[in-house]
Amino acid sequence: MAREALLSTHVAREAWNVAFRRTVPYPRVVAPAKRIDQAEVLLEALPYIRRFAGKTVVIKYGGHAMTDETLKQAFARDIVLLKFVGIHPVVVHGGGPQIDRMLSDLNISSTFVRGMRVTDPATMKVVEMVLAGQINGEIVAMINLAGGKAVGFSGKDGSLIVARRAASENGDLGQVGEVVGVNPELVRALQQQDFIPVIAPVAAGPEGESLNINADIAAGEIAEALEAEKLLLLTDVEGVKDANGELIRTLSSTQAQALIDDGVAKAGMIPKIECSLDALRGGVKKVHVIDGRVKHAVLLELFTDEGVGTEFRRDVGLGDDGAKRTGDAGRSQP
């Protein structure tokens, strides 16, 4: 009887299980393709986040990315995200279009020599007002609104940038400064307190006069002094191009210098290449010239395999690890 009762109980239990499975099915749940793609993006970023955590990345912010509202907000969020994943961003900004607009409103004409603005006293007043006053404050407010803790200042503060009047074979550049040294103590102190430094490229000369520093060069010099892992230069072009107008995905130091020597690099690209080479020689691991017109260009360059723009690296044998990025034979792995 006990055996029959046990069998009856077992049969009843199985019947109940079958009935339950019929009425309460448990199909395999498949996430939407878009969400899976988002997860893949995060996984692609993971090795880069791991490598760059605790490292300093200097970003020269300029061009169209500073004038388009959507791009401005995207840039601010990019910077805040870098900070929250453990990277120490330092922003050095330009402001050419805004300076041009203000000079035009005041009927002050501008001339350029190899990408550098000839700066007379009247122009210098406008440059300092726009860079250290208007733009710097706007960037700080934008980053803070996105959830970061930004602090703005110029190269004059804390004697961050030590400069003198630049000499040129092409004539007097006026109050254009040549960087002779960087005192990074102020930036390091802010980093230790989890602030995001935002720097206007204006310095004081030997006599206390204001000097206009090319923002690319200022960013490169600051990156060297901070021993930055990377220097990113935002531009209004895809990157560095060859004589046929094709984008160059990666450049060694020798190849980059040849572009200048052969006359391939023009106007505003020359200071970018020169400061990239100087930064590499000064110890910066990698330099990237990227298209600031692309939304989230900073994140795409730092956290994806292909990146956007042109990557500069040391010649093989001079400290380059020789590793390549997946999907691009000329791009470095994290």
Image (cartoon, rainbow, N blue to C red):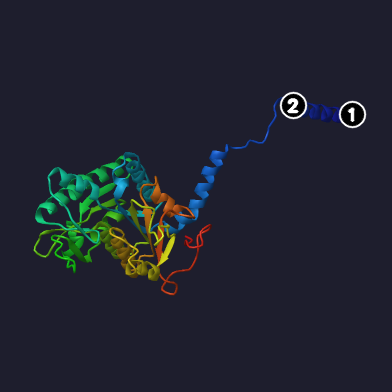
Q: How far across and how far down the image is residue 126, in percent?
A: 14, 49
Q: Is residue 101 visible?
A: yes
Question: Residue 186's image quarter?
Answer: bottom left
Quote the CA–CA distance across marks 1 and 2.
27 Å
* Residue sitting nearer the eye, 48 or 280: 280
Specify the amino acid type for callout 2.
Answer: Arg
Q: How far across and how far down the image is residue 280, in percent?
A: 35, 67
* Residue sitting nearer the eye, 217 or 109: 109
Specify the amino acid type for callout 1.
Answer: Glu
Q: Residue furthest bottom?
A: 317
* Residue sitting nearer the eye, 262 or 37: 262
Q: How far across and how far down the image is residue 151, in percent?
A: 25, 49
Q: How far across and how far down the image is residue 86, in percent?
A: 39, 53
Determine which residue is flagged by label 2.
22
Residue at image location 27% in from the left, 45% down from the top: 139
Question: Residue 27's image quarter?
Answer: top right
Determine which residue is flagged by label 1.
4
Is label 1 in a helix, a strand or a loop? helix
* Residue sitting nearer the eye, 248 or 334: 248
Q: Please tell me how crowded label 2 is: few (under 14), some (14-19), or many (20+) other residues with Cα within 10 Å.
A: few
Q: Residue furthest front?
A: 244
Is label 2 in a helix, a strand or a loop? helix
